[in-house]
Amino acid sequence: MVVLNKIYTRTGDKGTTALGTGVRVPKSHQRIAAYGTVDETNAAIGVARQHLGPDEAEVDAMLARIQNDLFDLGADLCTPEADEPLDYEPLRVSERQVERIEEEIDALNGELEPLRSFVLPGGSAAAAALHVARTVCRRAERLIVELAGLEDETVSDPALRYVNRLSDFLFVASRYVNDKGKADVLWTPGENR
């Protein structure tokens, strides 16, 4: 249970923050950058949801679940595996969350025509906003992969798979809300040479 009575604590005034294990690290630490960018992804998805129309309620429900999942992912990343046992069971992204997002990708993608070109971000406002969320998600993924590659740092396999699938979901969802791909703006190679 999270209880936030007071928003400012002053404990970070010297540029450090606490991980879920209680260990304090610089706010510039790779782990903080990784889950901070997951938070940015969540915010970008929140903006995208504001552009969805009433006929896109199914996508909105999927995005609402994803926003909740992203808090799970942030909790997972903020609590690295500890040498000493913790007094609580840390929250981890589950295989089921990865499977669910794959099922949702397949459901949306099943209604789209195959692509014959790359898609430019645009079309509808919702699609453009989902493309922004997708690019922020890709940045989060790069930071998480970088974190996982550091000595003495761990990231769970489901967390890595989830963030990778999420960018795929956001791409497919952007096409879906673009009139199921009919309003996609396609790249024309060398058009302006």
Image (cartoon, helix red, strand yellow):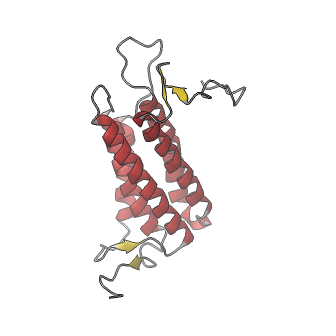
Percent from the top left, x then y, of residue 14?
A: 58, 27
Along the line of sight, the residue nearer the viewer: 164 or 103 = 164
Percent from the top left, x then y, of residue 78?
A: 46, 30
Residue furthest out toward the right = 5
From what the image shows, is residue 68 above or below residue 118?
above
Residue at (51, 38) in percent of width and height: 71
8 horizontally vs 176: left or right: right
Q: Quadrant of the C terminus?
A: bottom left
Residue at (37, 44) in percent of width and height: 143
Q: Quadrant of the N terminus?
A: top right
23 horizontally vs 152: left or right: right
Along the line of sight, the residue nearer the viewer: 33 or 35 = 33
Percent from the top left, x then y, of residue 8?
A: 69, 30
Percent from the top left, x then y, of residue 182?
A: 43, 79
Residue at (50, 68) in percent of width and height: 128
Residue furthest out toward the front = 14
Q: Is residue 104 visible?
A: no
Q: How many marks?
A: 0
Along the line of sight, the residue nearer the viewer: 124 or 27 = 27
From what the image shows, is residue 122 above or below residue 149?
below
From what the image shows, is residue 184 above or below residue 61?
below
From what the image shows, is residue 147 above or below residue 6?
below
Q: Is residue 167 visible?
A: yes
62 horizontally vs 10: left or right: left
